[in-house]
Structures are given as C-alpha cells and as structure tokens.
C-alpha cells in the first residue's frame, strides 16, 4: 500500500528540496505587545507564535521552588492548524510535546535569579506541516531571550528523518507520514549540547550518526537566524521622533 | 549618523578578561559570555545592560508601590515585580503616639493608594520589607507612568541630564522610581508632553544621541506651540 508513494524523484524531494535542505525560515521578534517576550516563527508551512510571561508570581503556591524559578511550557495546536479540524484543548500528544519542549529549554535558563517565580512559555501552532515542536522550541528560545530572561545560550531545533532509504533534513508532512523515521533534535548550537532527542521509526547506527550530523549543521544555521532576528530588532532605525 | 550600541544575545562571547565580568554576564571555561539579551556597556567592568526583564527589588531602592491587600499588621504592596512587598504598620505610627487598631488600617492607607517607599530589606525567601519616605503618599492630580525598569537610567540620563531637561522644558514635577514607575504632576498639557517624551525615551533607549534628539523634539514642540499661538493672535 505504502509502496506506491515515491518520496524521492530524480534525487529531489516532493517539494523540490535537496536531502540536506531546510525549508525557508522567517523569524520576527516582539510581535505581541502585552507579552514580556514574543516571537513568530515560520518553517516552511509551519507557523507558530511563542509568548513568554514572567518571571511572575507562581500560582498555585505549592508549586513554587524556594531556590529557583519554575519554567512552564504549553504547546497548543489551533483547531484550524491541520487539514481536519483538531479538537481543541490539550491531548496526549500536546502534553508530551509540552513536556519535552520544556526540558529542551530548561538547561539554558538560569533560574536561580528569580526564586519562587514562574516563567510561562506559551506556544501556539497556527499552521502545521510537520516539525511544529522544533519550530515551537526555536520560537520559545527567542521569546525567552526577548523577555530578558537570563540564559546561558539559545536553543535551536530541527528534525531529521529517513525517506525512501535516504537520511534527509527537515521532514515535511508527507515525508513524516510515509517516511521510515523521524527524529527531532534540539541543541545548543554553540556548544553542541543536545537538550532533546526523540525518534519515531528506525535508523541504523550509521544513519543515526549521519542524521545527527545533518541536524547539528542545520541547528547552527537556525541559531544564526535566531541571533540575527534578535540583534536586528534593536538595530532598526528609529525614523520617527527625529526632528 | 547615529552610532549603534553593540547588541548581544545570550551565549555571545564577550571577552577573555574574566576579572572584568560584570552584571548580565557569566563565566564558563575562563571566558565571559552574555547572559541576557541587551547592549554591551564596556567600562571598567564589562556589563550587559538588558533591554527588558522584570524588576527585582534590592535594599535601598526607592520604589512606587500600590496597596493591593491589607492583612494586619501589614499592607501588601505591588511594586511592579514578581515579588510583593509588605509594609509594617509601625512605619506609619512611627514617632507618634498613635496606635493603629486592627480594622482601621484602611483609614491611613487604603487599597489602591500609591506610596513612595524605600526597600528596607530583601531576605533569602524574597520577602520584601518597605519603609516609607517622608512624603510617602502620592495622589491627587498627577499621572503614573510605567516603563520597564531597565530603561530608568536612560530617562534619568548621565548624571541626571535627561530628567533635568525634562523637568525644565515640560515644567512638570517628575519623580522616577527604581521600579520603572514614574509620577508626573503638572498641568494637563504639560503632563501630556512629559508622558509622550518619557515613552519616546523608553522606546528608543537603545539608541545613542538620545538626549540631543529629545532636546530637539522639545524645542520644536515649543516653537510649534508658539507659532500656533501667533496664528490665533492674528485671527483675532
């Protein structure tokens, strides 16, 4: 049944990309006025918004940590983000993604500066096309920095996978559905520290190593884009107000 | 041409001179990195001045707070921070032979009242104790502005140059607290102008040459106003 679908034609993928090619990325910082930090992130057809609030008072009180801030992360898909309307609200999948994404960002946040507080990260998926958790982590990382949260580094994230026997970077929805493996990776690009790694499907050891290599170099590229977006936010000319 | 400050993001390498590492930086493997998203302040110490972030009180800060709860013998005060502050009632009864009874605390300071206070102490549990300033109660015909506390130094300016200019040219009473709250008192027009300028400073805090630009803005505003007056005169 699955045999019919060819994901690679003439050495190109369905959307015309090469094996090691990312989808186009767009990053905008500070799009939400009322959030302490926010970021809009596009990865091909994935569109996500991350908003960071806090550090703020932790409620309920008994979740407070007397020594450090608590990071909360909510990944949520809009009902209109997929082809068939998604039932709104948290489900098994989004609870899991929230947990792993939180843990992907947790190691870089210096939480000791704000004891007893909560740092809330909300990631809303507006449009989905495979790889939303990685897009969400990228967006959240930028939004955390924009909120002035002390951090050791930025986190970058991307998925690799296997389609028609080939290891490729950044799976699209079709490749995710009909491919053989999908492996989202989040890492601190500067130090090559992996903060999240999941795998769905099967890789041989060699394929895994090749995939990780692809992800590492892609994360570096994404890191550069994240950095540029943040730096440019404050390099915008201040046209108005000039007499 | 306006030169830009150098913007850094968390994880950016700053210098190898570890002993100069200041606020907003961290040291790892004998190198100094940025801990916050902000601009580099390269003086004796090398610091990263954050462009955003929440206010954390420290001892000696002067803040503007708002009473949000009365729980005997404390007033609980919002100081625009993740941490609430408290004010003991003895602060108000100080020096006088009055006793404040349970249930009558709101006669002295009620919910919603604004106070100017000094941070007496912050303990390891982040409990914040306040002491009142002599002229502690603010209210009446004035206006409270709130900007990010990270931008307060810019509004004050180098050795107070910016705020001095603001006060003179807007003809307003302006009080800036460490937590980013600003109290302005003056005529309606003057307050409008002053708030507009304060917000302008906050929005452009990361650019250099700001004092000159603000001065230009205020002067051109004044000129325009005088011209308008002249026109009205002609009409008459």
Image (spheres, grey):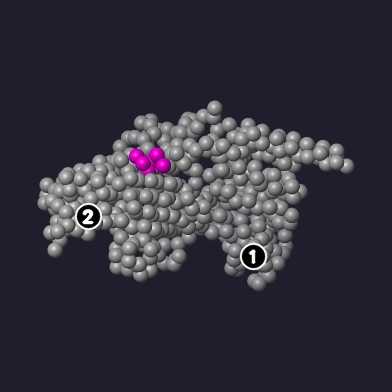
Main SS, magenta residues:
helix
Eye-nearest disc, 1 or 2: 2
Residue A160 visible to the viewer: no
Which residue is farthest top? B1
Pointer 2 indicates a residue of which chain? A
Residue denoted by label 1: B111
Q: Residue at x 26, y 56 (%)?
A: A173
Magenta-highlighted residues: A224-229
For mark 2, give the secondary structure: helix
User: Would you say A13 lies left or right of A228 here?
Assistant: left
User: Would you say A20 lies left or right of B127 here?
Assistant: left
* Residue B59 position in % (x across, y down): 55, 49
User: Would you say B178 lies left or right of A14 here?
Assistant: right
For mark 1, give the secondary structure: loop
* Residue B156 position in % (x across, y down): 62, 39
Residue sitting nearer the eye, A170 or A36: A170
């Amino acid at each position: 049944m699955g045999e019919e679908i060819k994901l690679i034609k003439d050495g190109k993928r369905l959307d015309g990309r090469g094996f090691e090619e990312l989808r186009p990325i767009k990053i905008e910082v500070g799009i939400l006025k009322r959030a302490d930090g926010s970021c809009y992130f596009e990865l091909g057809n994935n569109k996500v918004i991350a908003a960071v609030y806090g550090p703020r008072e932790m409620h309920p009180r008994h979740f407070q940590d007397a020594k450090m801030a608590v990071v909360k992360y909510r990944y949520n898909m809009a009902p209109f983000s997929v082809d068939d309307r998604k039932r709104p609200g948290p489900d098994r999948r989004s609870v899991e993604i929230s947990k792993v994404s939180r843990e992907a960002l947790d190691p870089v946040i210096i939480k000791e500066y704000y004891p007893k507080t909560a740092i809330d990260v909300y990631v809303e998926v507006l449009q989905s096309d495979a790889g939303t958790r990685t897009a969400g982590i990228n967006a959240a990382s930028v939004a955390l920095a924009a909120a002035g949260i002390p951090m050791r580094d930025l986190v970058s994230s991307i998925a690799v996978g296997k389609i028609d026997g080939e290891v490729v970077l950044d799976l699209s929805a079709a490749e995710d559905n009909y491919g053989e493996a999908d492996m989202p990776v989040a890492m601190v690009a500067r130090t090559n520290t992996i903060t999240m790694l999941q795998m769905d499907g099967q890789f041989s050891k060699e394929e895994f190593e090749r995939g990780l290599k692809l992800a590492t170099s892609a994360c570096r590229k994404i890191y550069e884009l994240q950095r540029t977006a943040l730096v440019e936010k404050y390099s915008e000319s201040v046209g108005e107000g000039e007499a | 041409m306006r030169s830009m400050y150098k913007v850094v993001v968390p994880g950016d390498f700053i210098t190898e001179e570890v002993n100069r590492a200041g606020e907003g930086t961290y040291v790892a493997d004998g190198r100094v990195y940025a801990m916050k998203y902000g601009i580099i302040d390269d003086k004796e110490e090398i610091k990263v001045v954050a462009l955003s972030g929440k206010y954390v009180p420290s001892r000696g800060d002067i803040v503007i707070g708002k009473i949000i709860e009365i729980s005997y013998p404390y007033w609980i005060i919002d100081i625009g921070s993740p941490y609430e502050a408290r004010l003991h009632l003895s602060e108000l009864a100080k020096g006088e032979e009055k006793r404040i009874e349970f249930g009558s605390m709101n006669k002295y300071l009620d919910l919603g009242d604004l106070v100017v206070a000094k941070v007496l102490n912050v303990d390891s549990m982040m409990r914040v104790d306040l002491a009142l300033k002599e002229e502690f109660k603010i209210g009446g015909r004035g206006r409270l502005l709130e900007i990010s506390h990270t931008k307060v130094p810019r509004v004050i300016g180098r050795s107070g140059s910016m705020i001095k200019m603001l006060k003179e040219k807007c003809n307003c009473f302006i009080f800036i607290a460490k937590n980013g709250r600003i109290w302005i008192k003056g005529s309606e027009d003057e307050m409008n102008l002053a708030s507009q300028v304060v917000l302008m400073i906050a929005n452009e805090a990361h650019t250099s040459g700001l004092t000159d630009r603000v001065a230009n803005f205020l002067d051109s505003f004044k000129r325009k106003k005088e011209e308008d007056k002249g026109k009205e005169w002609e009409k008459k």
